[in-house]
Image (cartoon, rainbow, N blue to C red):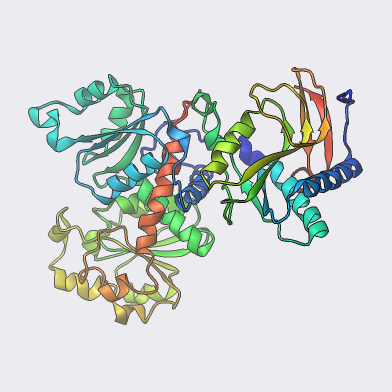
Amino acid sequence: MPAAPGPCPMDSGQMEAVLRRLAGELTAQLRPGEEVVLLGIRSRGLPLAERLGDLIRQTTGGPVPVGALDITLYRDDLTEMVGSPIVRPTEIPFTLKDRTVVLVDDVLFTGRTVRAALDALLDHGRPRRVLLLVLADRGGRELPIQADFAGLTLDVAQGQRVAVRVKEIDGEDRVTVEAC
Amino acid sequence: MSAERYTFPHKHLLGIEPLSARDITALLDQARAFEEVCERPDIKIVPALRKKLVVNLFFENSTRTRNSFEIAEKRLSAEIINFDADTSSLNKGETLVDTALNLEAMHPDLIVMRHSAPGAHALLARHMKASIVNAGDGAHEHPTQALLDAYTLRKKLGQLQGLRIAIVGDIRNSRVVRSNLWLLTRMGAKVTLVGPPTLVPREMQATWPTVDISHDLDAILPQQDVVMMLRAQFERGTGAYIPGQGEYSRYYQLNRERMARARKDVVVLHPGPINRGLEITSEVADGPNNLILDQVTNGVPVRMAVLYLLSHPHGEQVP
């Protein structure tokens, strides 16, 4: 059962523990010889992917390349937007061919960002398989997309938003549920 | 982050003059993201301008600017129509406004235009719903050239602020110079205009008061971080202002002897096409200091950034 969201479902210490657990679950799922790469979806998926990369390297000792994916140009609502949103560079300085790609994002909601991310990453090569890891799954899907690993599952009403803050960008680690 | 809140406030790119330093920085930052697209090993296309119609409207000859725009449009997945002045009804007496109204009936989203008359783009902007991109208008502006020059310099030297840049040659007849002056002075570079007195109008200092003027290339060369050579445009009237090509080359040609006076790491730019042996020798144009082909390469992501930022209708807009 999804946890009933309090105002702060995850603080700094809990986030660290959750990331450690997610890194463990991911490592346990990998098949022998499988080469894994992490792609963080900008903005807050990227620092999460970097931390997960460090944690996985500590366990396996192997290389875990981490890249950054900006999905702006692949959004399905781009043509309807008022003003062009600023695009930041995608940085994938390694091949995706035959790799296991783990997409990392902070919140899974409608699934549209993940759909865009799949299109974006497939333009960079053909991975062996793609997995999805999120810090928080808040429900409310509009596309048939599910997470393979979720740090936290919340049942959040439509009128509320799940705000993830990470110390690399926001100066603190915290997940809160706020009124829109 | 405040960077995410910023929206490019212009509907058209008629010139660099209306752009703030923040707008210029945003364009150059966007170009960095599109450079990544151009460098991909495989699929160099993004769906950013899907369903958008771009008309390339060239009333003057241009090979590289037009090709560069067309590659940029294709990499953004735009629909493209090339409208050639030579084959159009303009030869049958149609006015620019009539042409514009006919194009308007096709509902284009963006129009990339080169025209010999400085006011042509503003005129088009008044009569059409589409965003207008200036790809060169007479001796007035060539904004995407200035942006790609700035992008090339920023990529090589880090920042434009404080750079000492000499622009050398036919200042009078050059639209590249005017766009570069707006851009470079706004970004805090120190510009010196260099050429024979007849080709460097003194009154330019009234518009750009921080700019220096010199007629002695040898004297100012040692202090420069960048030398931007201009094309001697004999087809555009450079010849009417100077005694002859030999004399011009003697004083203003960038050659090996002059390069010996410059800093070892001086950067040489040229908007092309170059007149080998006239304003620049092959030795320098192909030498280790030149970024001339980098300028051409960088033109594509810079133009992708321009088209992308103009492609989404705003509410309140500045022209």
Res B6 seen here? no
Residue lying farthest to the front in this orientation? A32
Residue visible at 44% across and 42% down in the picture? B45
| Nearer-the-camera pick, B11 or B186 | B11
Residue B275's image quarter?
bottom left
Give the percent coordinates (x, y) of residue A115: 60, 32
Give the percent coordinates (x, y) of residue B141: 32, 45
Screen quadrant of the N terminus of chain B: top right
Residue visible at 54% across and 44% down in the picture? B22
Give the percent coordinates (x, y) of residue B196: 24, 66
| Nearer-the-camera pick, B100 or B9 | B100
Give the percent coordinates (x, y) of residue B153: 46, 60
Screen quadrant of the C terminus of chain B: top left
| Nearer-the-camera pick, A153 or A81 | A153
Residue A57, placed above or below residue B80: below
Res B250 seen here? yes
Residue A44, placed above or below residue B319: below
Q: Left or right of A68: which side holds B149?
A: left
Residue visible at 25% across and 47% down in the picture? B139
Q: Left or right of B236: which side holds A162?
A: right
